[in-house]
Amino acid sequence: MSTMIKIAGLSKSFGSLEVLRSVDLEVRRGEVVCVIGPSGSGKSTLLRCVNLLEEPSAGRVEVDGVELTDPDADLDSARRHIGMVFQQFNLFSHLTVGQNLTVAQRKVLKRRGPEALEVARSNLERVGLADKIDAMPSQLSGGQQQRVAIARALAMNPHVMLFDEPTSALDPELVGDVLGVMRGLADEGMTMLVVTHEMQFAREVADRVLFMDGGGIVEQGTPAEVIGDPKQERTRTFLARVL
Ligand code: ADP
Ligand code: MG
């Protein structure tokens, strides 16, 4: 299996605060990797470094064979293939669901209106919201808005999807539908890097779980290893609090 994400010696500091300390990570094509760990451990920063939303202080980031940390890299082009979904859905509130899905396709991928709309429709179908194409975001529940945000990312034909606590802002009863959509993507073979506190999801869907603390990967392995039988004291302490 080939490598989709390759991170080597990745460090990131904000002023004197060292947030990532020489992180090494490889994600294979089609692999689902869940990142767990306490607040402030650097999970979001790691994810944001994968598409260079944060500029690393040191180290290499390669996605789909392109080195993004190469000063000559075409970042816009590389980012097109990296979908990202945040805790806050960041939909354009003044646009319909359909328009939310077509705007970047038209601007960035130069797809024509009818084609972009067709892609929007099929991706809304994928997340179970084809009937909401003309709705405004404010008419949707938080869970539906997050599924729209996922569909919007998918409409760009990403090679990899990054999720940063996609269900953390949702009421508990809305979490399941979003996780269901993510599970479907995993089943389709999407490469996914997912920061989550949903241990049940990590157990069932992840190929690999990483536990981060203090800006580094403290422990990694299968869900059964890391969540079921953690080796490190810090992992045990964390799990005892969240499970
Ligand atoms: P996590 O996602 O695991 O909660 P983050 O990656 O968001 O952790 O943050 C790790 C640390 O980096 C925290 O101490 C946070 O306050 C700090 N941090 C994150 N982003 C910035 C920033 N843009 N400027 C300064 N400090 C930041
Ligand atoms: Mg975070």
Image (cartoon, helix red, strand yellow):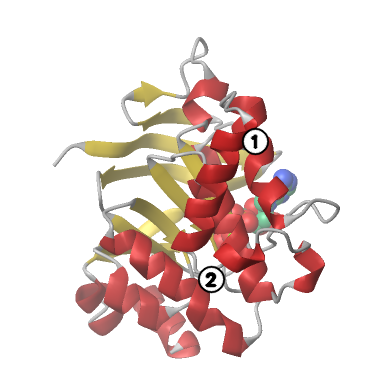
Q: Which residue is mark 1?
A: 104
* Location of the N terminus (image quadrant): top left
Circles 2 and 1: CB atoms closer than 8 Å: no
> Is residue 234 in view from this perspective?
yes
Q: Quadrant of residue 209?
A: bottom left
Q: Amino acid at mark 2?
A: Pro
| Residue placed most toward the observer, 37 or 63 | 63
Q: Which residue is mark 2?
A: 38
* x 58%, y 50%: residue: 152
* x 69%, y 74%: residue: 142
Residue 115 image point, x, y percent? 54, 35
Distance from the alpha carbon under mark 2 to that under mark 1? 34 Å
Residue 12, placed above or below residue 86: above
Is label 2 within 8 A of ligand 1 (CB to nearest ligand atom)?
Answer: yes
Of all residues, the one furthest to the front in this rendering is 114
| Residue placed most toward the observer, 184 or 35 | 184
Residue 219, placed above or below residue 193: below
Residue 216 image point, x, y percent? 43, 54
Of all residues, the one furthest to the left in this rendering is 1
* Location of the C terminus (image quadrant): bottom left
- Horizontally, is 63 left or right of 146 in the view? left
- Element on which disc 1 rests: helix
- Horizontally, is 92 left or right of 158 in the view? right
Residue 200 image point, x, y percent? 37, 83
The mark that comes first in sequence, 2 or 1, is 2
- Element on which disc 2 rests: loop
* x 59%, y 23%: residue: 110
Residue 228 image point, x, y percent? 25, 83
> Is residue 231 in view from this perspective?
no
* x 67%, y 27%: residue: 107
Of all residues, the one furthest to the right in this rendering is 94
Q: Amino acid at mark 1?
A: Ala
